[in-house]
Image (cartoon, rainbow, N blue to C red):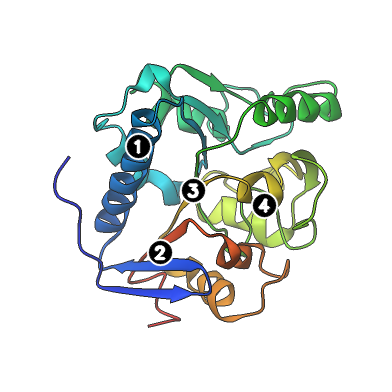
């Protein structure tokens, strides 16, 4: 991997470190550099890393740089993905499992990859199954993003709960979240976007020892501003990152426009 890019600006917001880069490529490379260093350190200390990955176009630069591999012993890394539409076949172009498989999991020899089953006939049982897998050992790293409505995973403002007793649950997707899927090019129209999904909850994400959160682009600027300057509230679920002791938010110039 090339040298780690230098951020244009850094700041601290409560406990959250924020790094702003000029370009998306620099942002993704810096985040990948740090994520690889985290995994290498976990393995150096004799543990087996467990990582949760977000699936969205905003993650492309991070995932592409991760595929360079670093010095991580990938057969000793266990991976999860953080959300999935209900009802989509696993080979659907919009499947988050497929997204991560094509951009990451097929390029590195992970020890295991756990997928949410979008076609389950019993979503509650599937959520319980996946929650058991997550709870089996601590999560070392979450590679996350922030949605246009401030969501993390599919924890939209209406369903986000910072004290949720569940680790995985079924949620109804709000209109802003569903429109983002159209804006991202995953679906041709709002009517095609599924209305429900399974998601890891906010406590499941925030319980990770480290969080690398990558948020590029002008469509995310309002959400970034709300997360960093508004109250810590489920009105902007990502604002909870400000309470995490080991989280870093990576922005490009466009997504940071509201705070520069």
Pick whichever of labels 1 and 3 is earlier in the sequence.
1
- The mark that comes first in sequence, 2 or 3, is 3
Q: Which mark is residue 24?
A: none
Decide which of tag 2 and tag 4 comes sooner along the chain.
4
Q: CA distance from mark 1 to mark 2?
A: 30 Å
Residue lying at 51% horizontally and 71% vertically, measured from the top left: 224
Q: Looking at the picture, tell me which residue is in the foreground, 88 or 84.
A: 84
Mark positioned earlier in the residue sequence (4 or 3): 4
Numbered badge on residue 41: 1
Residue 43, above or below 198: above
Residue 51, given in percent of the width and then of the height, sits at 50, 34
Q: Mark 2–mark 4 contact, CB under 8 Å? A: no
Residue 214 image offset from top left, x and y in percent: 43, 55
In this rendering, which labeled residue sits more in front, label 2 or label 3?
Answer: 3
Q: Nearer the viewer, mark 4 or mark 3?
A: 3
Q: Tag 2's secondary structure?
A: loop
Q: CA distance from mark 4 to mark 3?
A: 34 Å
Judge the density around disc 2: few (<14), some (14-19), many (≥20) Cα neighbours within 10 Å.
Answer: some
The residue located at (46%, 29%) in the rendering is: 49
Q: CA distance from mark 1 to mark 3?
A: 12 Å
The residue shown at (80%, 40%) is 170
Which numbered dot is residue 210? 3
Label 2 vs label 4: CA separation? 21 Å
Q: Secondary structure at mark 3?
A: strand
Residue at the spot of label 2:
217
Q: Position of residue 25 (x, y in %)?
A: 26, 54
What's the mark number on residue 190?
4
């Amino acid at each position: 991997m090339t040298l780690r890019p230098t951020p244009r600006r850094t700041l601290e917001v409560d406990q959250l470190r924020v790094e702003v880069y000029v370009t998306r490529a620099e942002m993704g490379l810096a985040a990948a550099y740090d994520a690889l260093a985290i995994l290498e350190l976990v393995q150096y200390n004799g543990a087996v890393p467990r990582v949760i990955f977000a699936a969205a176009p905003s993650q492309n630069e991070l995932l592409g740089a991760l595929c360079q591999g670093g010095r991580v012993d990938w057969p000793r890394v266990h991976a999860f993905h953080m959300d999935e539409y209900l009802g989509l076949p696993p080979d659907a172009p919009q499947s988050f499992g497929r997204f991560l498989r094509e951009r990451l999991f097929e390029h590195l020899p992970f020890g295991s990859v756990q997928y949410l089953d979008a076609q389950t006939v019993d979503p509650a049982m599937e959520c319980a199954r996946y929650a058991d897998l997550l709870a089996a050992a601590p999560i070392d790293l979450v590679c996350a993003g922030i949605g246009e409505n401030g969501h993390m995973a599919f924890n939209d403002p209406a369903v986000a709960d910072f004290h949720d007793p569940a680790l995985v649950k079924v949620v109804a997707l709000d209109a802003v979240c569903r429109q983002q899927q159209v804006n991202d090019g995953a679906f041709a129209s709002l009517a095609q976007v599924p209305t429900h999904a399974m998601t890891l909850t906010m406590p499941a994400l925030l319980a990770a020892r480290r969080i690398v959160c990558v948020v590029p682009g002008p469509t995310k600027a309002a959400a970034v501003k709300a997360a960093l300057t508004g109250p810590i509230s489920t009105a902007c679920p990502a604002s909870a990152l400000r309470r995490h002791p080991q989280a870093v938010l990576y922005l490009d110039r466009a997504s940071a426009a509201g705070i520069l």
